[in-house]
Amino acid sequence: MISAILLSAGRSSRMGRSKPLLPLGNKPVVRHCMETLLQGGMDEVILVVGICGEAVIEAVVDLPATIVRNLEPESEMADSVRCGLQAVSDNSDAVLVALVDHPLVKPATLRAICEHYARTSADIILPTYRGRCGHPTLFSRDVLEEIRLLSTLHEIVRREPDRVKTVPVQDTGVLIDMDTLKDYQKVLQFWHRPPGLAHSLQRVGIE
């Protein structure tokens, strides 16, 4: 069983607006991310929202998910992971940690990560595009439990490099995040104009 934790409790301070509720296509970003996780084959999805997350919850209220609140508005990402981890099923073998500010990841990428885990039982799996590591990251349940003692997910990944495996994907979305309004505008450009790969990469500033 593979679970997913979708982190949506950030303050969006650099964006100036709530990232989860920004429109992408005909739906809010958080709903797009949730649907991608479900289409990608996640057995359960835990959505971590902030202390004022009612509007975010309302945007996905009809989707199958467990809602968890991070009640500390000044906390870090790792704290939201710890909150989500408390809700993960006891039967879960691995956990995919996804970020609401990476809304362009494709369901096929998630399936590729899960298939790699099914074949290898790797402790940590990262998607790569043209040799560059991106998001989301899959952790075996035992490895993710280390977040209870360590400060960040990055620290877990760096702790023992030999246990990190990568999966090459044809998905620029693993590299595209949106922390600022300028980033969001680039995401919208990519969303509405995806005809040519080189053209799209140039627009989002990857190449």
Image: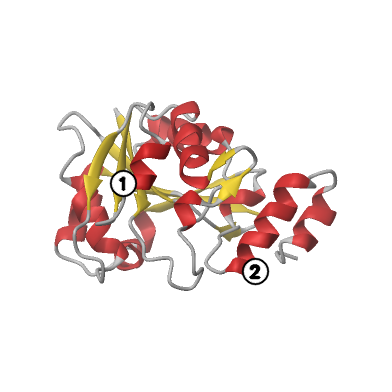
In the visual, does 50 lie left or right of 103?
Answer: left
Q: Is residue 103 left or right of residue 142?
A: right
Which residue is at a point 48% across and 73% down the rendered structure image? 14
Disc 2, disc 1: CB below 8 Å?
Answer: no
x and y, in percent, of residue 162 in the image: 37, 58
Of marks 2 and 1, which one's residue comes earlier in the chain? Answer: 1
Of residues 126 and 85, the one drawn nearer to the viewer in this rendering: 85
| The quarter of the displayed image where residue 1 is located | top left
- Residue 5 is drawn in which quadrant? top left
Amino acid beneath label 1: Glu
Callout 2 amino acid: Lys
Residue on which the image places disc 1: 54
Q: For the residue carrying disc 1, how many other residues have a C-alpha within 10 Å: few (<14), some (14-19), or many (20+)?
A: few
Q: Please say if 158 is above or below 61.
A: below
The location of residue 34, given as percent across then percent down, is 44, 37
The label number, if any, that marks residue 114 in the structure image = none
* Residue 195 point in image, percent of width and height: 84, 43
Q: Mark 2 points at which residue?
A: 182
Secondary structure at numbered mark 1:
helix
Q: Can residue 127 be seen in this view?
A: yes
Residue in the picture at 46% in, 44% down = 30
Question: In percent of the image, x 19 and y 52: which residue is there?
Answer: 83
- Residue 104 seen in the current view: no
